[in-house]
């Protein structure tokens, strides 16, 4: 199994919206990718919540059967279509993939 974790820190304003609105939009877009390819075992998206410690605004936690499933997800047109918006609203991004 491959675990794929990504965190985004967002700009205060971008694409005509504030950070909170863009975080929720990112969550919706990522959750819509939950079943786009076989081999996705889990896909969970969280937005930073007031009162809880968070140094990033959005986190994606996902699990894939194998590397091929992760590659298929990352190269799927629906996932690729997210990149322009995500690139426009993000200030920073951290990612880690690992086998479990």
Image (cartoon, rainbow, N blue to C red):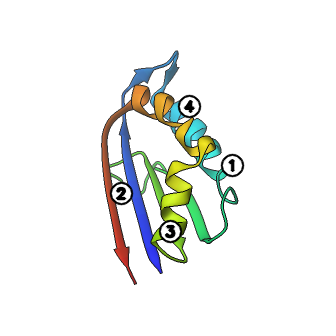
* Relative to 32, 59 lies left or right: left
The spot of residue 79 in percent (x, y) is 57, 45
Whether residues under marks 4 and 3 lie with C-beta atoms below 8 angstroms apart, the answer is no
Whether residues under marks 2 and 1 lie with C-beta atoms below 8 angstroms apart, the answer is no
- In primary-sequence order, the first of circles 2 and 1 is 1
Quarter of the image where one finds residue 92: top left
Q: Residue at x 43, y 65 (%)?
A: 4
Residue nearer the viewer, 82 or 56: 82
For numbered disc 4, what is the local secondary structure?
Answer: helix
Q: Residue at x 47, y 28 (%)?
A: 84
Residue nearer the viewer, 85 or 8: 85
> If the image is split into quadrants, where does the C terminus sit?
bottom left
The spot of residue 14 in percent (x, y) is 44, 20
For numbered disc 3, what is the local secondary structure?
Answer: helix
The spot of residue 37 in percent (x, y) is 66, 60
For numbered disc 1, what is the local secondary structure?
Answer: loop
Kindly report the distance in space between the C-alpha atoms of the residues bearing marks 4 and 1: 17 Å
Of the two numbered discs 4 and 3 in the rendering, the one whose residue sits closer to the viewer: 3
Kindly report the distance in space between the C-alpha atoms of the residues bearing marks 2 and 1: 26 Å
Of the two numbered discs 2 and 4 in the rendering, the one whose residue sits closer to the viewer: 4
Give the residue at the far top of this rendering: 16
Q: Residues within 10 Å of mark 4 (few under 14, many from 20)?
A: few
- The residue that disc 4 covers is 21
Kindly report the distance in space between the C-alpha atoms of the residues bearing marks 2 and 4: 19 Å
Kindly report the distance in space between the C-alpha atoms of the residues bearing marks 3 and 2: 34 Å
Q: Which disc number belongs to residue 53? A: 2
- In primary-sequence order, the first of circles 2 and 4 is 4
- The residue that disc 1 covers is 32
- The residue that disc 3 covers is 68
- In primary-sequence order, the first of circles 3 and 2 is 2
């Amino acid at each position: 199994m491959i675990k794929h974790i990504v965190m985004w820190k967002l700009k205060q304003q971008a694409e005509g919206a504030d950070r909170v609105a863009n975080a929720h939009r990112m969550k919706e877009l990522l959750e819509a990718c939950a079943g786009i390819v076989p081999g996705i075992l889990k896909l969970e998206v969280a937005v930073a919540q007031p009162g809880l410690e968070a140094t990033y605004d959005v986190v994606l936690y996902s699990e894939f059967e194998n590397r091929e499933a992760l590659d298929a997800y990352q190269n799927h047109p629906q996932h690729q279509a997210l990149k322009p918006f995500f690139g426009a609203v993000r200030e920073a991004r951290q990612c880690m993939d690992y086998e479990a």
